[in-house]
Amino acid sequence: MRALHTAATGMMAQELNVQVISNNIANMRTTGYKRQRAEFQDLLYEHVSRVGTQTSNQGNQLPAGIELGSGVKTVGTPRLMTQGTLVQTGKDYDVAIRGEGFFKILLPDGRTAYTRDGSFELDSQGRLVTAQGNLVQPAITIPQNAQSVAISAQGQVSATLPGQTTPTTLGQIELSMFVNKAGLQGIGDNLYLETPASGAPQNGTPNVDGFGNLQQGNLEQANVEAVSEISDLIAAQRAYEMNAKVISAADQMLQSTSQLMR
């Protein structure tokens, strides 16, 4: 019976939907995390009677045909790249982006990754790195004896060195923007990779030409809303249950048919 297969596709779709929602909830406290949303489309139709088919020699046409759908499919789980709330940490090397843009990160294999997670640290050489030890690009080195490290809204990193009264510029943080941010590929560790769908990165200076500004001593929180996720979870659970009911009803109908044949 067709209904068994159709309802099964609905159950599989809602199972995936719950998986996406559970990942969003699990990352509610992940710095810079962007929530995902499952998107669905209906499957192919069997046209038993096509709409517009001629029904008589006088040119009469069917105003509505008979179309039997075959279920649902998942077409994507795009990320919603809306701004997360900024939370003050007071740490010198915590930097949040307020607005558009991603930090550029150099991976060990030479590829460039992108992130909204600005919880940076210093490595043994005084270079600005991520929590995994990957270098921030362009590379910025903080002298060991540097005092009062400051990161401006435009991404200029400066510090006061011993014997000097004027801050010394140490480097410039750059940001990257993409035509299609949702087209970035997530690889874990709060990192994304460029893809053909995202387009090539457009590099620039923070707070200039549409790029967001930087906020030192702050971090961007995940854009996950607990109430919204729980509501979506309940709706997905109910949709799963209703599809299961359809399978149960189809099974009872098949059982009644088989009993008639005895």
Image (cartoon, rainbow, N blue to C red):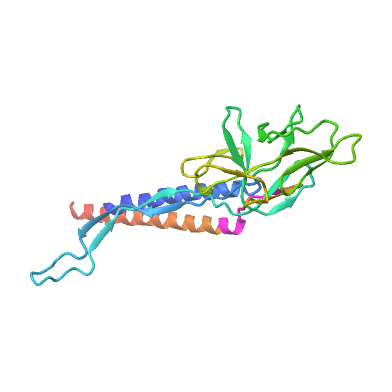
Q: Dividing the picture into quarters, in which one does residue 128 lie?
A: top right
- Is 176 placed left or right of 260 in the picture? right
Question: Residue 83 in the image: x percent, y percent?
Answer: 62, 54
Q: Give the residues drawn in magenta, as a range.
A: 219-230
Question: Residue 67 in the image: x percent, y percent?
Answer: 25, 60
Viewer-proximal residue, 58 or 173?
173
Q: Is residue 13 magenta?
A: no
Residue drawn at the location 89% of the way across and 37% of the way down? 164
- Is 69 placed left or right of 86 in the picture? left
Residue drawn at the location 48% of the way across and 55% of the way down? 236
Question: Residue 149 in the image: x percent, y percent?
Answer: 81, 40
Count of numbered marks: 0
Q: Residue furthest right?
A: 163
- Is 230 placed left or right of 43 in the picture? right
Question: Residue 151 in the image: x percent, y percent?
Answer: 76, 44
Residue drawn at the location 20% of the way across and 58% of the way down? 48
Q: Is residue 226 magenta?
A: yes
Viewer-proximal residue, 234 or 203?
203
